[in-house]
Image: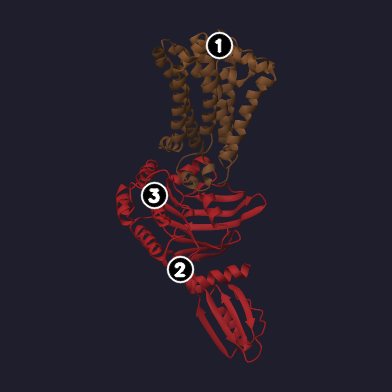
Amino acid sequence: MADSFIIETDELRKNYGPVEAVRGLNLQVPAGSICGFLGRNGAGKTTTIKVLLGMARPTSGHVRVFGLAAEAQQASVDIRRRTGFVSDDKDLYGYMTVEEMVRFTAAFFPRWRADLQQRYLRTFELPLDRKVKALSGGMRTKLALLLALCRGAELLILDEPTSGLDPAMNEEVLRALVAHVASEEMTIFFSSHQIAEVDQIADRVVIIHRGRTVVTGALEDLRENFRRIQLVFDGEAPEPALRAPGIERVWRQGRVLTILSSAGAERILDEARPLNPVSVDVVPVTLKEIFLETVLTED
Amino acid sequence: MLWYKSWLETRWRFVIGLGLLMLSAASTVVVYPQVVKLLPMASNVDLSGEIGRRVAESVELSRDYRGYVWSQWFRQNMTQLWTLFAVLLGTGGLLAQSAGGGALFTLSLPVSRNRLLGVRAATGLAELLVLAFIPSLLIAVLSPTVGQTYGAGNTLVHGACMFIGGAVFFSLAFLLSTVFSDVWRPLLIVLCVAIMLALSGHVFPDLARYSLFRVMSAEVYFRGGGLPCLVLTASTAVSVAMLYAATRNIARQDF
């Protein structure tokens, strides 16, 4: 496995009894990237994250973070020492005050960033003397984010970091994340349902469905390569046997034949021209469409 | 800081336990003059059966202050209350926190699960140690107020037996808390076990000599038989085995 990947999984499987939560997941997250981890509910995102952090043990396959085997106990401790984490539930210790929570967490991380702590306490307007259980959901998310960002970590793993936030707070949190990454050298791996926010801050995307990777790559490459090709015919659209690479989905509706390609349009157009379409339309595809099309195709 | 976290999680159970035990210890001493006054009347009461035998035994023991303290405090009030708080302090922990208690946050810290559990167990045992000694030492301190004396050495021996014998209940609750994700099932199961152990001594008198409560109250020591080293060692071994099983159990859990 190459050293340039901070996270790497190879045929990762995780079963909970008879339920297959992750089914042969292959994942590669390069160092320094902001990788959005997309998938429907129950796709296996949270399970994958738990395996990366040693909270759940893989049934089979290999998982390496910083080149260390995540399933090994001591290696897992070392991984967590270099990783900031925000869980999807944002559960912290309700009986501690914000100040106690910060002091408690700082004690475990030798590279704790006191300067960032002060900055984020101010930016997020967190009341130091308030008990965590008395914080609103948004404030708790901000505190969880502060506790992750100040660890001096090389990797941030965020599980639905903005879930349950109102749009204004959502924007505030995303801005804080982007500003943080701009000033620190780190890798971010975050799961989300919000395709718009992945589009906004990620440079790489992994889409998983039913425990398997269905799309992975740099967001720019995906934007460049994914195309929707619409061919209109005089009569009923034909059922062509296209052999061009990257055909994700083909569907016919009356006179219209639509093709979703993940490898550009040229090769497909070369094959389609002999069918004599009366019009050809090639349009770029948004991340949302890529997500929906790949996930729906798999269904 | 894990110690601090464990302390915050258990402090109210500990403080309430300490308060109740100190109150119970103080009242045991304070009512002794009234008990002495009532003793002549007790000899006229004719009770038969097991209850009668136990009342008569208590009356006899109460004629001497050391016997009274052992009978009322070490054998009865303290054993019952201490067992309850041993079970309460043994419940909870990582699995119970998996629903809304920050378990994932804890597991994201660079700390092994063994250490998490070790600190949690050590905190609970340290609190139990305080509950075993401080209220009993209060008896030694308060006894002069009713014109009696009670040796601090005695309280230390009884406290040690209470702690070592009763740690079995703590360890069982601790182990069950790594099996069940709520606090109620471990609590109820261990309390049921404790009640059954207490009843078995009455139902099968021949088994009473092996009772854990007899170890906790240091009855053999009180009756001049020395320290029950073998039984105390066995209790310690059982506790250690259950705590070890708890760490193994948590190590293989998925959260």
Q: Which residue is mark 2?
A: A196
Q: From mark 2 to mark 3, how far is it between C-alphas? A: 25 Å
- Return the x and y of residue B215 as percentages of the image width and height: 58, 18
User: Would you identify the image quadrant in which residue B42 lies?
Assistant: top right
Chain A shade in the render: red
Look at the numbered discs 2 and 3 and tell me whether their residues touch, using CB distance below 8 Å. Answer: no
Q: Which residue is mark 3?
A: A147
User: Would you identify the image quadrant in which residue A274 lies?
Assistant: bottom right
Residue plotted at (43% across, 10% down): B149
- Return the x and y of residue A222 as percentages of the image width and height: 50, 70
Q: From mark 1 to mark 2, how far is it between C-alphas? A: 86 Å
Q: Nearer the viewer, mark 1 or mark 2?
A: 1
What is the tally of numbered marks visible in this picture?
3
> Is residue A193 found left or right of B238 in the rendered image?
left
Q: Amino acid at mark 2?
A: Ala
Residue plotted at (65% across, 91% down): A235
Pick whichever, B207 or B239, lies toward us: B207
Secondary structure beneath dot 1 equals helix
Q: Amino acid at mark 1?
A: Met
Looking at the rendered structure, whether the residues under marks 3 and 1 are on a common chain is answered as no
Look at the numbered discs 1 and 2 and tell me whether their residues touch, using CB distance below 8 Å. Answer: no
Residue A60: mark in rendering: none
Q: Amino acid at mark 3?
A: Leu
Secondary structure beneath dot 3 equals helix
Chain B shade in the render: brown
Tag 1: Cα neighbours inside 10 Å, few (<14), some, or many (≥20)? few
- Return the x and y of residue A214 as percentages of the image width and height: 58, 64
Q: Which residue is mark 1?
A: B41
Is A227 located above or below residue A197 in the figure? below
Pick whichever, A68 or B120, lies toward us: B120
Is B114 located above or below residue A298 in the figure? above
